[in-house]
Amino acid sequence: MRRYFKWDKKYLYWGITAFCVIALCVSFYMALNNFSFLVRAAKALAGILSPFIWGLIISYLLYPFVKFLHHKVFRPFTKWLFRKSKTHHGIGLARMLSVFCAEVAMLLIVAALLYMVIPQLYISIETIVLNSHIYIENLTRLTGKLLADFPELESLASSMLGDANNSIVTWLQNAILPKLGNLLSNLGTGVYVVLIGIYNLAIGIIASVYLLCNMEGFGASCKRMIYSVLSVDRAKKFLDALAFVNKTFMGFINGKLVDSAIIGVLCYIVCSILDMPFTLLVSVIVGVTNIIPFFGPFIGAIPSSIIILMVSPIKCLIFVVFVLLLQQLDGNVIGPKILGSTTGVSAFWVMFSIILGAGLFGFWGMLLGLPVFVVIYTAINVAVENSLKRKNLPSEQIDYFGLDHIDPISMEPIRKEGIHIEYKGKRTIPDISEDE
């Protein structure tokens, strides 16, 4: 009897799985052997697509401002403008006006910063380099007066200041000033660099205009594609995860930018009133470093204090007191108002994420390490909660304080003998005390 071959879905599934695993292993092996080529190819592709990458970044940063202008400013205006029309509602016009105003505001802010800040920064750094020997002499005399009764310490401090002077001057003259000079020279005479920059900026702005004008349409296309690939439940979970990631990054980045701009402006105003030296340079340092969570205030305050100390120790002391007050204002009033609620992770994990991000990716790691860690931390926490719920175990952290074991029958937490938990107000972390 002739027997026909019958497909078995189970074996077909395992065969396809084995093929995919082997193909992935071969691809991974080839990628490792050609890693340098892949890096060069990725850099070349990023260079080609850089205008569109900048367009995506601009769209992502400007979209909240565009939404605000659309709903609060131009949509009410177009409703009033087309109040008698039965065919036109003015939605497209409101969106175009919102996008135009947001793009113009961005260009004006960038142009103003470049026009005002860069030349003044160069002048300030050049002044520090040229007058560094005077500043070091002032510090040496001040140190001599303070340590007059301790000649050994005075000699050591003078030697350290002399070495620091030589190192700082050498670094500024050989590293910083040539780069700043080349930058200004390239901006003035480097036609090719200027043209490439203008090209990337122009294409990026055009791409961002298209994206911002139809952001909801692009979002609908992405959701349509996700639902075509995943099941309804998994698609919803995936979209919820994307919404959380977007909320985390959007709130953090935009909030930090606004917060740092406010801190920089306040620092400039107060330093101008107090007649601090190198006011613009110090304000830029304080404002830019304030973008970095946790460590930003310390990173900005230390070099700024040293710069002012070289000119006037009294003003340095005043500046230190002012920066402490400013950071208290930022941490307790301005920051919470702009950034909203806290990140949901402890100070230890905040410090851990920033240090790890800085070690792996430098400045961008310090800046984005915290929101990335919040996303990963939340994903792990959700996975742990889901796993505990599937096992019918308590999922709240409070249930595991002072835990001895979980009863296998009732699935209730059993705490150690002599330990009780006291709740105080609305504290989410309880006080655990042991009875004597």
Image (cartoon, rainbow, N blue to C red):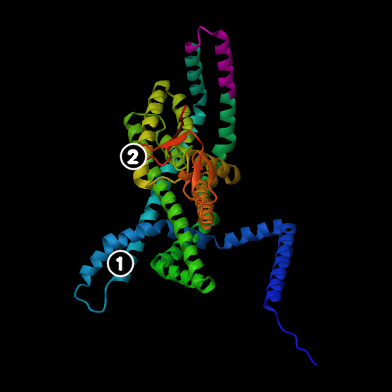
Q: Position of residue 407 (x, y in %)?
A: 53, 47
Name which residue lies at 55% across and 38% down: 176
Location of residue 71 by image quarter: bottom left
Residue 272 in the image: above or below residue 230: above
| Residue span colored magenta | 145-163
Mark 1 residue element:
helix
Q: Amino acid at mark 2?
A: Val
Q: Residue furthest bottom?
A: 1
Residue 253 in the image: above or below residue 103: above
Q: Is residue 247 visible?
A: yes
Q: Position of residue 334 (x, y in %)?
A: 34, 41
Mark 2 residue element:
helix
Question: What residue did someone put label 1 on?
Answer: 94
Q: Who is closer to the viewer here, 408 or 311?
A: 408
Left or right of residue 82, residue 228 in this image = right
Q: Main secondary structure of the magenta part?
A: helix
Task: Kindly report the distance in space between the C-alpha atoms of the residues bearing marks 2 and 1.
Answer: 34 Å
Name which residue lies at 53% across and 70% down: 230
Q: Who is closer to the viewer here, 220 or 36?
A: 220
Q: Who is closer to the viewer here, 153 or 327?
A: 327
Left or right of residue 54, residue 265 in this image = left
Q: Residue furthest left?
A: 84
Q: Is residue 201 visible?
A: no
Question: What residue did someone put label 2 on?
Answer: 333
Q: Residues within 10 Å of mark 2 (few under 14, many from 20)?
A: few
Name which residue lies at 38% across and 48% down: 112
Q: Residue furthest top?
A: 149
Q: Position of residue 31 (x, y in %)?
A: 71, 60
151 is within the stretch colored magenta: yes
